Image (tube, helix red, strand yellow):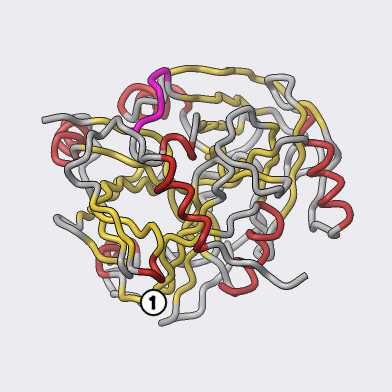
Amino acid sequence: MFKRINGLQHIGVAVADMDLSLRFYRKFFGLDIPFFDSVQPAPLMDVYTRNSTITKRASMVVNLQGGCAIEVIRPTSFEPVKALQPLKMGDLGIFITQVKCRDIRASHAFCVTNNAVGLTPIAKDPAGRDTFYIQDPDGNVWQYLQGDQWYTNSGHHSGGVLGCTTGVSDMDKALKLYAGILGFDEVAYDRTDNFADWDMLAAGKEKYRRVLLTQSNQPGGGFAKVTGKTYIELVEALDRKPFFIFQDRIWGDTGYAHIGFDVKGMKSIGDDLASAGYPFTCDSNNALSMGNTKVHCTYIHDDDRTLIEMIEVYKVPIIEKWGVFLNVEKRDPLKPLPDFMLKALRFSRIKDKA
């Protein structure tokens, strides 16, 4: 059976105020096209919610200019709580999401003009690229980097998600999973030092090992033209024992909830993961419905309990309000969707009043 991890599909982020956060993500990152927005129980996540089924509102939003999506989650059956202590660089779990922009200085100027919280000066990352950081309404850290892969141009200064940064306790062990099994096998950099781009962030002046990974294979899947090349940065804190971000909290509490991969051949991928010691912790087993989107979802977690979702897409809305959907279950897994279908997504764009 054909099997492939096509690449990063989305980052999950749980928030305290759904509408406020969605407006923020539209304004600062151009994530203005929803694939779905629905309120449903989440029995799949019982293993990560103390064996109690929660209800949540979830919205998957994308920037058609390029980049991956984010899934924004807000529990409706309980009030989400913050991390038990202020988060620091290198803490265990996802602590930064990276977005791409066309002009780093133009994006920085936009953030200055619009009073972005936690805005840092432009500095060099370990690869020598200009970068800066801001915070969203829940204090999550977002990193801007200049991107070179674009699909359309809507005039927004920002593109979508480029990747994420997650803390690990043992870099060499983490690399066996992310590089060896999940297919992010190309090392863009591997540096141990103090880093100028983190000077203004919590515990940013400490010493870290930072490893940036990407895939040597070309991105695959129907949305590959939009998502483009994606990255995962692994970080090991060397000056202290890092804190687990979701310590004594559950999925749905605020913060970066999970990394989502687009895959084809779920059963074969599951067999490989199980034989490597990372069996599915939960599995929808068949098509899971989220509004009019139908997918097969599974989860694993890494050695530091960071949640990783696998998604095999069966049916996605192209223009949901007109009832236009696409069944992708039998499509060539490496063949991107035709341009007219991808560009039709613009008719679902949400525009906020100035």
Where 23 sits versus 257, above or below?
Answer: below
* Disc 1: which residue: 39
* Side (left or right) of 191 relative to 186: right
Where 338 sits versus 215, above or below?
Answer: below
* Side (left or right) of 228 relative to 192: left
Tell me where residue 208 appears, x and y as whole percent: 64, 28
Q: Residue furthest bottom?
A: 77
Q: Nearer the viewer, residue 319 or 101?
A: 319
Q: Nearer the viewer, residue 116 or 206?
A: 116
Tell me where residue 281 appears, x and y as whole percent: 24, 51
User: Within 10 Å of the Cα at label 1, are there few (<14), some (14-19), or many (20+) other Cα atoms?
Assistant: some
Tell me where residue 47 appears, x and y as whole percent: 27, 62
Q: Nearer the viewer, residue 347 or 34?
A: 347
Magenta range: 216-220
Question: Can you say which quadrant of the picture contains the C terminus?
Answer: bottom right
The reply to whether the magenta stretch includes residue 243 is no
Where 305 sits versus 43, above or below?
Answer: above
Tell me where residue 119 appears, x and y as whole percent: 81, 49
Q: Residue at x 64, y 54 (%)?
A: 30
Q: Give the amino acid type for the residue marked by disc 1 in the picture.
A: Val
Question: Can you say which quadrant of the picture contains the N terminus?
Answer: top left
Residue 306, visible in the rendered structure? no
Secondary structure, magenta segment, majority class: loop
Residue 16 occupies quadrant? bottom right
Tag 1 secondary structure:
strand
Residue 308 occupies quadrant? top left
